[in-house]
Amino acid sequence: MKPNKNIDQEFLEAVERVNRHLEPFPADFLLRLYAFYKRATNNDSSPNSRNNLINAFKTNALFQARDVDTNLAKANYVELVNAYFKPKVQK
């Protein structure tokens, strides 16, 4: 698939936003980010946490994203980040 400069820039900005965030993220959110990041960057390395349970969760997340192409993975990553940081409406 041909690179899309707009999605590439949005992806890099979303990654930077996540990296700057100081509070902990929910585990399910992190796993989805992990899988989409790995697919977006064509990183096929196996999870290498010291904790076998964490490796199992990461492997499962990667398995669920196995058919996602690079640009779609970038778009999904950006969408997740934007949704997470979307201002919460006060009731």
Image: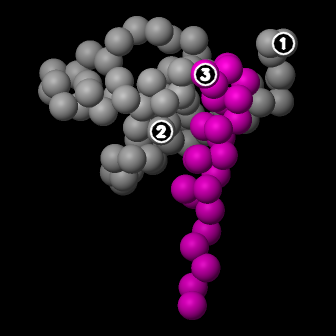
Mark 3 / mark 1, whichever is N-terminal: 1
Q: Which residue is mark 3?
A: 67
Which residue is rendered at x = 55% and y = 56% of the image?
84
Mark 1 / mark 2, whichever is N-terminal: 1
Above-or-below relation of 91 to 69: below
Magenta stretch: helix, strand or loop mostly: helix
Q: Which residues are magenta?
A: 67-91
Q: Is the C-beta separation of discs 1 and 2 under 8 Å?
A: no
Which residue is rendered at x = 49% and y = 30% of the image?
64
Mark 3 / mark 2, whichever is N-terminal: 2
Above-or-below relation of 44 to 14: above
Location of the C terminus by quadrant is bottom right
Label 2: which secondary element: helix
Q: Is the C-beta separation of discs 3 and 1 under 8 Å?
A: no
For label 2, the crowd category at 10 Å Cα-Cα, with few meaning under 14, some 14 to 19 and many 20 or more, is: some
Residue 76: image x %, image y %? Answer: 64, 38
Q: Nearer the viewer, residue 28 or 25?
A: 28
**In terms of image quadrants, where is residue 12?**
top right
Q: Is 60 one of the magenta-colored residues?
A: no
Residue 79: image x %, image y %? Answer: 66, 46
Q: Which residue is mark 1?
A: 2
Q: Which residue is mark 2?
A: 32
Which residue is rendered at x = 62% and y = 62% of the image?
86
